[in-house]
Image (cartoon, rainbow, N blue to C red):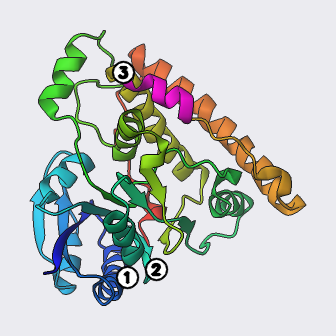
């Protein structure tokens, strides 16, 4: 009998990218089902969408449900019975063998708690020095071979468990209030908490990057897009550390990214890395000022999930 594997695609205003994403997933689904005794059941969860994302899902013939409250709540809405869950962002495209590789690992290696494919940026659309530097950095995967966390763009997981809104509010009640972090709000970034909680519970060996397959994503290509991505990830990382101090040790031990591949990079790639570091320094400075102004009441609290429009393209 074929096992049913739930595949949840979370989408927030992804009408431009969703069609290409679902088409690539359908090809990958057919490839996997032809080689394994499984049946992959896709579902699109609309996360507070206000555009034509629902129509794009309907055009692809994929069932749709509606969710409120961000990506984590959308994933919770998509949970269904199965030996493990597959989750995918709506603004990516996957190689044909990707779902097969994920399901094969999860079926054959019970000690693996989370499996995820290699991640690569889609071809550049802008031709500026910064866009090129960001593309090289992402294509070379940060010049680091360390993979002690996983990317939430596409992953398979045995036990998906994220704190509820009530749990967040209870933890926030014991901390000083913050205008910037909004500690009682629901978590928006899933892989920070899930990576740390799984590493803390099972060790780094429980996270497995597959050797086959790939997930292709459109990386930010402007400083504004880079900063918006940096701010929401950095803010969520710091908020997670405040709310879940029991996970700090796992982050301290495994969260750094040694640049062990940089020495073997070409001179051109090292130049791109230098330009990336300059832009990243600007993001770090802007973030500190942003946080200080909000906490002092000079600026309003930031949007927890600002749109990065340049990444929402096929």
Q: Which residue is mark 1?
A: 24
Asked whether residue 250 is drawn in magenta, I would say yes
What residue occupies the far right of the structure in this picture? 267
Label 1 with label 3: CB-CB less than 8 Å: no
What secondary structure do most residues of the magenta stretch adopt?
Answer: helix
Which tag, 2 or 3, sits closer to the chain's start?
2
Q: Nearer the viewer, residue 26 or 39?
A: 39
Which tag, 2 or 1, sits closer to the chain's start?
1
The CA span between labels 1 and 3 is 39 Å
Secondary structure beneath disc 3?
Answer: helix
Residue at figure coordinates x 38%, y 16% from the top left: 297
Q: Nearer the viewer, mark 2 or mark 1?
A: 2
Dot 2, how many residues are within 10 Å of its Cα: few (below 14), some (14-19), or many (20+)?
some
State the extent of the magenta-drawn residues as a range: 245-254
Q: Which residue is mark 2?
A: 95
Q: Nearer the viewer, mark 2 or mark 3?
A: 3
The answer to which quarter of the image holds residue 39 is bottom left
Which tag, 1 or 3, sits closer to the chain's start?
1
- Position in image of residue 254 (x %, y %): 55, 35
Above or below for 41 versus 196: below
Quadrant where the image shows the N terminus: bottom left
Secondary structure beneath disc 1?
Answer: helix
- Position in image of residue 148 (x %, y %): 52, 44
> Which of the labelled discs sits on residue 246, or is there none?
3
Above or below for 211 versus 10: below
- Position in image of residue 96 (x %, y %): 43, 84
Residue at figure coordinates x 76%, y 53% from the top left: 261
Above or below for 222 versus 204: below
In the rendered view, does 81 fall on the left or right side of 197?
left
Instruction: Evaluate whether residue 90 shows in this view.
Output: no
């Amino acid at each position: 009998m074929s096992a049913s594997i739930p595949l949840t695609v979370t989408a927030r205003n992804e009408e431009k990218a969703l069609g290409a994403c679902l088409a690539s997933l359908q090809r990958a689904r057919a490839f996997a089902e032809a080689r394994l005794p499984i049946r992959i059941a896709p579902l699109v969860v609309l996360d507070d969408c206000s555009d034509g994302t629902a129509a794009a899902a309907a055009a692809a013939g994929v069932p749709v449900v509606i969710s409120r409250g961000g990506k984590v709540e959308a994933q919770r809405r998509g949970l269904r019975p199965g030996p493990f869950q597959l989750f995918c962002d709506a603004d990516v495209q996957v190689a044909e063998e990707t779902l097969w590789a994920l399901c094969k690992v999860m079926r054959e290696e019970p000690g693996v708690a989370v499996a995820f494919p290699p991640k690569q940026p889609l071809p550049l659309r802008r031709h500026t020095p910064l866009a090129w530097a960001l593309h090289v950095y992402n294509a070379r995967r940060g010049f680091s071979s360390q993979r002690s966390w996983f990317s939430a763009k596409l992953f398979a997981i045995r036990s998906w468990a994220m704190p509820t809104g009530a749990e967040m509010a209870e933890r926030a009640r014991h901390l000083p209030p913050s205008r910037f972090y909004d500690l009682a709000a629901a978590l928006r970034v899933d892989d920070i908490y899930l990576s740390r909680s799984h590493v803390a519970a099972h060790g780094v060996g429980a996270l497995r990057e597959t050797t086959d397959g790939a997930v292709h994503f459109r990386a930010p290509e402007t400083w504004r897009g880079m900063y918006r991505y940096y701010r929401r990830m950095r803010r969520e990382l710091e908020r997670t550390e405040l709310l879940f101090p029991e996970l700090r040790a796992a982050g301290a031990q495994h969260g750094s990214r040694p640049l062990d591949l940089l020495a073997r990079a070409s001179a051109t790639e090292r130049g791109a890395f230098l330009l990336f570091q300059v832009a990243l320094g600007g993001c770090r400075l802007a973030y500190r000022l942003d946080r200080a102004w909000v906490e002092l009441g000079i600026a309003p609290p930031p949007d927890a999930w600002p749109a990065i429009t340049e990444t929402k393209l096929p």
